[in-house]
Image (spheres, grey):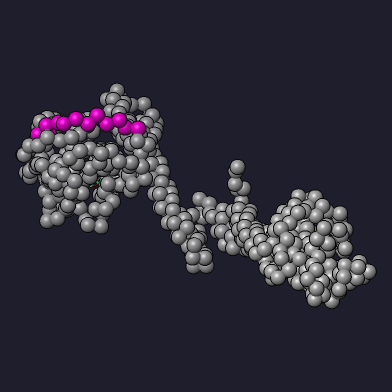
Amino acid sequence: MRLPSSLTTRLALAYGLATAAILASVAAYLSSALSAQLEGRDESELVGEVLLVRHLLREVRSEAEIRADTHRFADIAMGHEGLILVVRTRQGEPLVTLNPRNEIVPPLRVLPATTQPEKGMLQTWRPKNGVPSRGIAALGQLGDSDKAVEIVVLRDAGYRVALIREYRHQLLWATLCGAAVAAGLGFALARRALRPLRRMAADAAAVTTSRLATRLDVGSAPAELRELAAALNDMLARLQDSFSRLSEFSADLAHDFRTPISNLIGQTQVTLAQSRKTAEYEALLESNLEEYERLARMIENMLFLARADHAQVALDVRTLDAREELDKMAEYFEAVAADREVVLTVSGSAPVEADQTLLRRAVTNLLDNALRHAPAGSTVRVDVARAPTAAGTGTGTSIRVSNPGPAIPPETLPHIFGRFYRADPSRRNSAASTGLGLAIVDTIMRLHGGSVTVRSVDGLTVFTLQFPAEPMPVPIAPAAIS
Ligand SMILES: Nc1ncnc2c1ncn2[C@@H]1O[C@H](COP(=O)(O)OP(=O)(O)OP(=O)(O)O)[C@@H](O)[C@H]1O
Ligand SMILES: [Mg+2]
């Protein structure tokens, strides 16, 4: 059986059912108590009738006198529904018979005249309706003589059963009506109690992307809903945060694409304004090529970040010799370093659990930055070492890239891993910079379950890549857009 989907209906049903259960048990108790009471009263009456008939018999002297005034005896049984009274001689000849339904008088054990009848002496018989009933037979003395007649008093319990049945019927109706009223009341109460929930739904329905700052009123919500309202508000806050970051991100994206494209258009228009020498066209194409490359790099980087956001980057994590990898990269950057008159050194050694391509990409981005920011004549150092993980879950590997140079201002430090962030505004439109390098490093480290941190003090900037002991890919979605 399926429960109704409405909470109000469920509560109303629950109220109704609970009330019905309570009323039904009270009704069952009442009807069985009444039945026991009626039965007890019937039994006392049977004993009382025998005593009464015996008393009347004391006042008559002969059987003939009884026959002459049967009404006296019959009156005793009057008004007692289902009562049968027979007074007969010891030979079985009836003197008084009050038996409206003509029940067959059963053979009962007859108590002697001297025995005081009691409830415990009642015997069971079955009238025509089949309901087990009680009866008693006893001798009664005539006057002071030692002559006695037989008194039989029976009670047909059918009437009592009918009475109880009728009573139960009424109780059943009362129970059903009570349950229906309780369900109705429950419905009204539940509707009233759930009003704050409907108000909350209306508030939530009013939240749109342009009204993400709307919050649910936690203070006026009932205690049970306060937690829900607070959780929804937290969710709204997170959504608002992500949404505004996403908006900023798209604005940045548009801006960053517009610059190389307007460069391309501007330079091309200027060149085409008049006829030029072949060398000038060649220079234009060369300059355009630079912009195309920048655009291509940006698109490639964006694609990588987008794929990582949707966990579509498959990692091929292996145990690599970090030193070997770093040496190769140092060799690759040798020419650039020499060009900038910077010395590049690699020290330490440790295995690392990483995806080779992504590891190279992360270190390349760090080295590219370090070599660019290191002043001529300085040294860029790369260190690799075993290091306990930040979470204390074992020993991982750390790769540190440090370069001397002007420190990154502390207020910009939290932003440098953001997409399109460039601390130095003059680099904003530089063809060499996309502002995505560190965002990619951050994403790569998250993909590995590791982290990247930066320290920039006293003219030394140090980026540390922390690889975990065991790679544990973590979802990176919204956090990466920081
Ligand atoms: N070693 C460093 N020393 C000083 N500043 C740095 C260093 N590394 C990064 N930064 C600052 O952080 C900013 C963000 O770096 P990021 O690598 O993300 O972008 P980028 O180098 O400008 O562009 P891209 O790497 O995409 O070519 C840089 O613009 C720079 O201002
Ligand atoms: Mg960079």
> Is 206 positioned to the left or the right of 456 in the image?
right
Q: In the current view of this chain or complex, which residue is farthest to the right?
A: 68
The residue that appears at 47% across and 58% down in the rendered structure is: 228
Residue 317: image location, x then y, percent: 22, 31
Residue 376: image location, x then y, percent: 9, 43
Rendered position, 379 above or below 277 = below
Residue 14: image location, x then y, percent: 60, 56
Q: Quadrant of the N terminus?
A: top right
- The segment highlighted magenta reads 312-323
The residue that appears at 71% across and 58% down in the rendered structure is: 109
Examine the image and state in which quarter residue 363 appears.
Answer: top left
Q: In the current view of this chain or complex, which residue is farthest to the top?
A: 278
Rendered position, 409 above or below 317 = below
Viewer-closest of 12 and 463: 12
Asked whether 444 falls inside the magenta stretch, the response is no
Examine the image and state in which quarter residue 472 appears.
Answer: top left
The residue that appears at 18% across and 35% down in the rendered structure is: 353
Q: In the current view of this chain or complex, which residue is farthest to the front?
A: 146
Viewer-closest of 402 and 166: 166
Viewer-closest of 438 and 204: 204
Asked whether 317 falls inside the magenta stretch, the response is yes
